[in-house]
């Protein structure tokens, strides 16, 4: 029948393909064997390609970028279970701004060995730094930044994250190319204090996109700024916007004022958040303490103080009610003997 003929044709075609592959392999082996026996020399053009190129080292010595991917920087971005929607959106915004990140599923924050787990995962994923968002009581968000360098990982720092505003929430007009490399801007206080100088290195490792990364775009169109004020670090993300004047008169005025025909301005993109440093450790997620913020007050202590103040207000209100009642009881007029005269 027709089905039997189609099956026989398919079997013949399969046998023919196998024979053809075997013949091609035998021919290639013969060619390689003949080349080895003849001992053919490498052509001059290929010899020129094999010779080491000294232009690369000379360009690097001169400070000229060759555009190659040399800084193999990878950052593991992970969070704990129990994060709120705001914290999860902040984590996604940070992943969008970091094309060199490595993604991982949520970790159990109730386990005391969470830091050890993060270190093991980062080693398996070949990551040099870690950004870990930890949520406590579905209210408090803590950020860990750690550096992993071979056998001696560290240092690491723990922040309390507050005043979180995501990109979708702010609806700002700034926009940038996804995967573009940022300019990291730090104020002058990061060079004056020792612990801020250490934090600057951790920020550069985490948020600085390496040049030539496969997922990064070769453009610089945004600035990520870090400001130190009120013993906290304020993080902002801006777009570098260059505008050209529409008329010749505007071009002349801009050239007189700024010395060039284009105007450069900054437009905020988001997200924005505030980091309150708690403690800096020598190791990764633990170890000896290098710095501790003496002015830091935990959110649990602040909530306890607020409840204590509310309880004190209630006690004061009840105390004033009792005093008013006692005062009314004391204000009793004596009996007048003339009240019964005209009764």
Image (cartoon, rainbow, N blue to C red):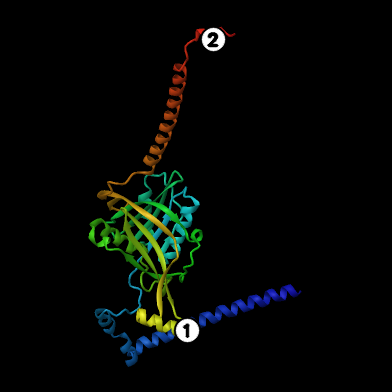
For the C terminus, the quadrant is top right
Number of numbered discs present? 2
User: From the viewer's perspective, is 171 left or right of 234?
Assistant: right
Q: Between marks 1 and 2, how big is the CA–CA gap?
A: 99 Å
Out of 64 and 34, give the one closest to the viewer: 64
Residue 299 makes an appearance in the image = yes
Label 2: how many Cα within 10 Å (few below 14, some 14–19, many 20+): few
* Kind of element beneath mark 1: loop
Residue 220 makes an appearance in the image = no
Earlier in the chain: of badge 1 and badge 2, it is 1
Out of 208 and 286, give the one closest to the viewer: 208
Residue 316 position within the rendered picture, expressed as x and y whole percent measured from the top left: 42, 29
Residue extending farthest bottom = 44
* Kind of element beneath mark 2: helix
Mark 1 vs 2: CB contact within 8 A = no
Residue 296 position within the rendered picture, expressed as x and y whole percent measured from the top left: 31, 46
Label 1: how many Cα within 10 Å (few below 14, some 14–19, many 20+): few
Out of 132 and 125, give the one closest to the viewer: 132
Residue underneath mark 2: 339
Residue at point 33%, 66% (across, down): 185
User: In the rendered image of this protein, does residue 99 appear above or below residue 335?
Assistant: below
User: From the viewer's perspective, is 308 left or right of 151?
Assistant: right
In the drawing, what numbered circle is on residue 247? 1
Out of 319 and 303, give the one closest to the viewer: 319
Picture quarter containing residue 330? top left
């Amino acid at each position: 029948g027709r089905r039997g003929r189609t099956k026989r044709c398919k079997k013949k075609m399969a046998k023919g393909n196998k024979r053809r592959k075997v013949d091609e392999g035998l021919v290639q082996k013969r060619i390689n064997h003949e080349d080895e026996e003849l001992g053919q020399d490498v052509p001059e053009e290929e010899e020129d390609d094999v010779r080491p190129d000294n232009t690369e080292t000379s360009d690097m010595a001169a400070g000229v970028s060759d555009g190659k991917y040399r800084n193999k920087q990878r950052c593991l971005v992970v969070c704990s279970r129990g994060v709120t929607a705001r914290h999860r959106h902040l984590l996604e915004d940070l992943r969008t701004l970091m094309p060199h990140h490595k993604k991982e599923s949520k970790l159990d924050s109730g386990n005391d060995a969470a830091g050890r787990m993060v270190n093991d995962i980062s080693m398996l994923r070949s990551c040099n730094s870690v950004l870990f968002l930890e949520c406590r009581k579905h209210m408090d968000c803590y950020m860990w930044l750690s550096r992993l360098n071979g056998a001696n990982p560290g240092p690491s720092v723990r922040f309390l994250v507050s005043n979180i505003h995501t990109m979708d929430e702010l609806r700002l007009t700034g926009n940038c190319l996804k995967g573009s490399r940022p300019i990291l801007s730090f104020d002058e206080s990061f060079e004056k204090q020792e612990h801020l100088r250490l934090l600057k290195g951790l920020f550069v490792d985490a948020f600085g996109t390496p040049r030539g990364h496969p997922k990064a775009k070769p453009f610089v169109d945004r600035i990520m700024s870090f400001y130190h004020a009120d013993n906290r670090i304020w993080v902002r993300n801006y777009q570098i916007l260059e505008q050209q004047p529409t008329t010749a008169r505007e071009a002349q005025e801009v050239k007189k004022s700024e010395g060039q025909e284009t105007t450069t301005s900054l437009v905020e993109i988001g997200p924005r958040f505030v980091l309150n440093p708690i403690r800096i450790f020598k190791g990764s997620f633990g170890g000896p303490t290098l710095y501790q913020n003496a002015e830091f007050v935990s959110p649990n202590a602040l909530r306890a103080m607020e409840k204590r103040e509310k309880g004190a207000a209630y006690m004061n209100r009840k105390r004033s009610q009792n005093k008013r009642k006692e005062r009314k009881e004391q204000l009793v007029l004596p009996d007048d003997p003339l009240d019964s005269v005209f009764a």
